[in-house]
Amino acid sequence: MKRTERVGAIVKILTDSPNRLYPLQYFCDSFSAAKSSISEDINIADTAVRAAGGGFIETISGAGGGVRFVPDITQDSLQALQEEFCRRIRDSRRILGGGFLYTSDIMFDTHLINGLSIVFAKKFRDRGADYIATVETKGIPLASMVSRQLNLPLVIIRREAKFSEGSTVSINYFSGSYDRVQKMSIAKRAVIPGSKAIIIDDFMRGGGSTKGIADILSEFEVSVVGTGVAIASTLPEKKKIDDYTAIAFLGKVDEEQKTIEVFPNCRIF
Amino acid sequence: MKRTERVGAIVKILTDSPNRLYPLQYFCDSFSAAKSSISEDINIADTAVRAAGGGFIETISGAGGGVRFVPDITQDSLQALQEEFCRRIRDSRRILGGGFLYTSDIMFDTHLINGLSIVFAKKFRDRGADYIATVETKGIPLASMVSRQLNLPLVIIRREAKFSEGSTVSINYFSGSYDRVQKMSIAKRAVIPGSKAIIIDDFMRGGGSTKGIADILSEFEVSVVGTGVAIASTLPEKKKIDDYTAIAFLGKVDEEQKTIEVFPNCRIF
């Protein structure tokens, strides 16, 4: 195999499984090449990946070391992504009344949310998390993509305990958006006590649902090391959780004027 | 930029967005290179991607043409994936009673389901589908990954109509697994009448839920052009839908002996 082909193949393998560590030997065996050749290939692959945008290849030396692809986003690409995201949200046909917006088409557009997932993967990559946690339903595709980017398992908290979940723990919490008490349920075997989780959700208004996730996780002594939401509303200003990262902020939704105020979070990083 | 770097960058860009068509000119502009050089780069990138496994680069000529990465899986990799999938399911600690198995950890393992998603992407890529459809909750991560592989939007059918979905259409259907009538609800604006959908779900017993999805889609004259389930039980032999593709079959679950019979579907392609 020629070097150009080897470099392309290495890029494919590494970027297919973001944040998964491959020992150098893996590539030596796959391509019957010496370690020195593969090392040089990796350097070229890193340059190539950086040029394409969206991440870099990291080499971790020593025993248990190897190489991995780390998803990343440049400031320019982030701005372009946020503008595109805000532009999609701003469409007045989304207004449903009661301050609600129809956003399912955005949250289920896998190309767009793959972009958003990279933002959270960059933000939270050094938190030492063991899981990505979300509550059904609309944030699941986004949380799945973050899971993939960070190479971490996903935990989905249900609204109702299901038989297929085995024994579960449930809590009740107050949702400001729906102005009522809601329920959350988690399978006992879904999490390991003492571990760390990143919470990902599509939307936050008062933070009740996000706090609910943190509360139910704390029943298992799982600590939250990061919270990412695609959209956070500017009001109420005081949320039930303090530390979160939003990609866009939703301001006033004017049903009469048919306008939606939405703007990017300029302080993600 | 050197050719080796350009090839690596092209691999990264194309494989990042499977089944997304890029005009050749896009790469000429990105890398300030002539069309003839980029054409040769693409050929090398195709060889590289095939060597890495998991797909190939397709060139579509003529106006509106371009290049795209098509996810694929070799017979050997498919067998290895199915064996790994069956091995994970076969763990007797999954037995919950009543024939139910705990499979959330498998269905939420994004590395594994990314593999399964490629199988469905290969199976259904020529069906001319407009959407991937699933019903909440456990199949959503898998359906999200298939969405990404086929570059199609995702439609998630809800169990209950939500205010944030706008006006919805609901149906009732009989679920054999739960031995009761269940409900499904879909946002009117989620689908375009007359379009085509691929149904993806995590599990099929009698096919009631899958038939429910087909029925609710048919309310919008959306036709189903493919159905993929990760696991199908061997019983009942007669399902409510005829044409589906399972990755693994679940046979007898013996609660006394603590054994789970599960085997790969050898006739996917």
Image (cartoon, coloured by chain):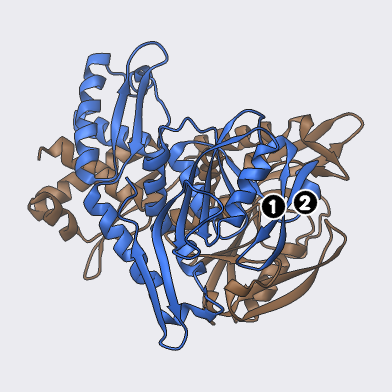
Chain colours: A blue, B brown
Front residue of A152/A231: it is: A231
B191 shown above or below B66: below
Query: Which residue bears the numbered disc 1?
Result: A158
Q: Secondary structure at mark 1?
A: loop
Badge 2: chain ID: A
- Residue at 18%, 58% (x, y): give it: B26
Type of the residue with mark 2: Ala
Residue A58 vs B6, above or below: the answer is above
Q: Can you see residue B130?
A: no
Residue A24's place in the image compared with A4, above or below, is above
Using the image as rendered, state which of residue A76 and residue A99 is in the foreground. A99
Q: Which chain does the numbered disc 1 sit on?
A: A
Element at badge 2?
loop
- Residue at image x 31%, y 58%? A81
Q: Position of residue A262 (x, y in %)?
A: 37, 69
Quadrant position of residue A173: bottom right
Q: Residue furthest bottom?
A: A256
Residue in view at x 66 percent, y 30 percent: A192
Say which amino acid is labelled 1.
Answer: Arg
- Residue A76 visible from this viewpoint: yes
Q: Residue at x 36, y 17 (%)?
A: A25
Q: Indicate left or right for A118 with A43 as reference.
A: right
Residue A70, x across and y down, in percent: 34, 35
Coordinates of residue B60 in the picture (x, y in percent): 27, 61
The label on residue A161 is 2
Q: CA distance from mark 2 to mark 1?
A: 7 Å
**Quadrant in which the N terminus of chain B is drawn:** top left
Residue B252 x, y percent position in the rendering = 84, 40
Tags 2 and 1 touching, CB below 8 Å: yes
Q: Nearer the viewer, residue A201 or A267?
A: A267
